[in-house]
């Protein structure tokens, strides 16, 4: 069984050192993949959902030893890293995940695939973002900052996927993922093996080695039911074949 935390400290800390030392600035927040306590620890199992970048979150530090230490601001030390998602459901002050199309869609897909209840759905999934540095004050990271941090973030994403070994990586990133997928595919052109239409949008699937990459749109202002159904059908189709 894998020890994600140990591997992250050993293999990701040097990459985050490069990211923070060379590309961070005052007012930035740092992100690393988070996972539920029941995320599968066997190879080629589980689902990792990927967004663009953090939007207005502050983990309180740009200090590498804090971020990879055993503190409340650590990126790796918390056992239930995603519990905050359900704790924020229904918030009347601060961030409310019930009002987030991104989290509502992830919840719907997780419940459909894993047949989990209202309290358990987050425990078997992982949540990631393409870009690891973003402004604490909110909003997407700028085009110039994206360009600067891309190479290091691509290396981090590849390492995160290697360590956690999900079977499915689902991008809700509206084309931000293009260069990352090219990097993951060693610079070769992607070959799509399946797709699903939902309204005016399409979700596509490609396979890189043993992993399935599902490429879709950011869910904001889109039909969440059709979007969720398209993705779950694609996953179920793959499961029927594998």
Image: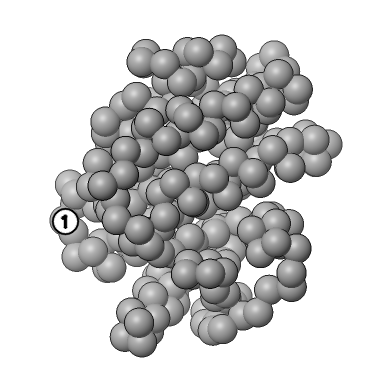
Q: Position of residue 220 (x, y in %)?
A: 54, 56
Instruction: Tell me where residue 234 sits by quadrant.
Output: bottom left
Q: Is residue 221 visible?
A: no
* Residue projecting furthest to the bottom: 241
Q: Is residue 190 visible?
A: yes
Compared across the picture, whether 133 is left or right of 120 comes to: right
Q: Position of residue 241 (x, y in %)?
A: 36, 87
Residue located 27% across and 33% down the image: 80
Task: Identify the element where label 1 is drawn.
Answer: loop
Q: Nearer the viewer, residue 49 or 161?
A: 161
Compared across the picture, whether 123 is left or right of 145 comes to: left
Quadrant where the image shows the C terminus = bottom left
Per the image, the residue denoted by label 1 is 117
Compared across the picture, whether 193 is left or right of 89 comes to: right
Q: Within 10 Å of the Cα at label 1, are there few (<14), some (14-19), or many (20+) other Cα atoms?
A: few
Is 69 above or below relative to 193?
above
Q: Nearer the viewer, residue 129 or 142?
A: 129
Question: What count of labels does the image hold?
Answer: 1
| Figure coloring | one colour
Is 240 above or below relative to 92?
below
Residue located 68% across and 73% down the image: 190
* Residue projecting furthest to the right: 144
Q: Nearer the viewer, residue 105 or 99?
A: 105
Is 128 above or below relative to 22?
below
Q: Position of residue 55 (x, y in %)?
A: 57, 35
Is 154 above or below relative to 61?
below
Q: Nearer the viewer, residue 131 or 182?
A: 182
Q: Position of residue 25 (x, y in %)?
A: 72, 18
Residue located 54% across and 73% down the image: 207
Instruction: Tell me where residue 183 sits by quadrant.
Output: bottom right
């Amino acid at each position: 069984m894998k020890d994600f935390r140990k591997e992250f400290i050993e293999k990701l800390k040097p990459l985050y050192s490069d990211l923070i030392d060379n590309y961070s600035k005052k007012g930035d927040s740092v992100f690393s993949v988070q996972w539920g306590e029941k995320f599968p620890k066997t190879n080629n199992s589980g689902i990792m959902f990927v967004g663009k970048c953090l939007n207005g979150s502050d983990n309180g530090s740009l200090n590498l030893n804090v971020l990879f230490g055993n503190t409340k601001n650590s990126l790796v030390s918390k056992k239930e890293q995603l519990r905050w998602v359900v704790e924020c459901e229904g918030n009347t002050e601060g961030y409310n995940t019930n009002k987030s199309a991104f989290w509502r869609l992830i919840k719907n897909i997780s419940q459909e695939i894993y047949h989990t209840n209202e309290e358990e759905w987050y425990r078997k999934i992982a949540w990631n973002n393409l870009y690891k540095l973003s402004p604490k004050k909110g909003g997407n990271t700028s085009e110039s900052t994206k360009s600067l941090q891309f190479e290091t973030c691509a290396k981090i994403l590849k390492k995160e996927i290697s360590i956690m070994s999900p079977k499915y990586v689902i991008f809700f990133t509206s084309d931000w993922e293009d260069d990352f997928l090219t990097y993951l595919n060693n610079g070769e052109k992607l070959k799509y093996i399946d797709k699903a239409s939902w309204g005016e949008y399409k979700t596509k699937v490609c396979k890189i080695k043993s992993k399935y990459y599902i490429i879709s749109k950011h869910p904001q202002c889109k039909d969440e039911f059709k979007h969720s159904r398209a993705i779950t059908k694609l996953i179920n189709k793959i499961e029927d074949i594998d």
